[in-house]
Image (cartoon, grey):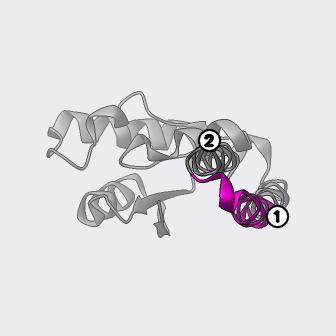
């Protein structure tokens, strides 16, 4: 949400520069949206606070959640995941590395993204012996 706050401010400023006659409307709409985004940020922080720090590890098929991990104190398990993109089928050795990392880190669950391959993540979860959590939306 905090990145979107910055984007919202940039869009607001560009709209005001292009159409100063409607500056008040753009400013009010941006402010209302920023209030919602900050509330969402606070909600996420409250939810994350319930997760022990040692368990704040994300395993996904793509690094779409890098900003989320950074902003909310998660480790993004990505040393072998970099090859597991939505554009190509990973090699068996790459999948095996991910499974090994999940086991070694004691990860209890992994996530599939709406843009990722659910079949691949189901395979990884099954072979690693972990839960496949509900999809993450980006």
Residue 33 belongs to magenta span: yes
Which residue ends up furthest to the top in the rendered image? 79
Q: Main secondary structure of the magenta part?
A: helix
Quarter residue 116 falls in = bottom left
- The residue that label 1 is drawn on is 39
Secondary structure of the residue carrying tag 2 is: helix
Which mark is in front, 1 or 2?
1
Which residue is painted at 33% across and 33% down in the image? Answer: 82
Neighbor class of circle 2 (other Cα within 10 Å; few <14, some 14-19, many 20+) is some
Residue 32 belongs to magenta span: yes
User: In x, y percent, where is residue 99?
Assistant: 37, 43
Which residue is painted at 81% across and 54% down in the image? Answer: 45
User: In x, y percent, where is residue 19?
Assistant: 59, 53
Q: Is residue 4 above or below residue 36?
A: above
Between 88 and 16, the residue placed more toward the observer is 16
Secondary structure of the residue carrying tag 1 is: helix
Give the magenta range: 19-37
Q: Is residue 108 left or right of residue 34?
A: left
- The residue that label 2 is drawn on is 69
Q: Is residue 87 above or below residue 130?
A: above
User: In x, y percent, where is residue 77?
Assistant: 50, 36
Between 16 and 87, the residue placed more toward the observer is 16
Q: Is residue 77 left or right of residue 69?
A: left
Between 83 and 101, the residue placed more toward the observer is 83
User: In x, y percent, where is residue 60?
Assistant: 43, 49
């Amino acid at each position: 949400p905090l990145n979107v706050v910055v984007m919202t401010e940039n869009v607001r400023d560009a709209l005001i520069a292009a159409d100063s006659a409607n500056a008040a409307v753009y400013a009010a709409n941006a402010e209302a949206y920023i209030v919602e985004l900050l509330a969402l940020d606070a909600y996420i922080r409250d939810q994350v606070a319930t997760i022990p720090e040692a368990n704040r590890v994300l395993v996904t098929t793509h690094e779409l959640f890098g900003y989320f991990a950074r902003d909310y104190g998660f480790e993004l398990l990505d040393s072998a995941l970099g090859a597991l993109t939505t554009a190509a089928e990973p090699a068996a050795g790459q999948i095996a590395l991910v499974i090994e990392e999940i086991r070694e880190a004691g990860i209890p669950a992994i996530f599939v993204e709406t843009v990722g391959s659910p079949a691949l993540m189901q395979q990884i979860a099954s072979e690693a012996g972990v839960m496949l959590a509900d999809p993450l939306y980006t």
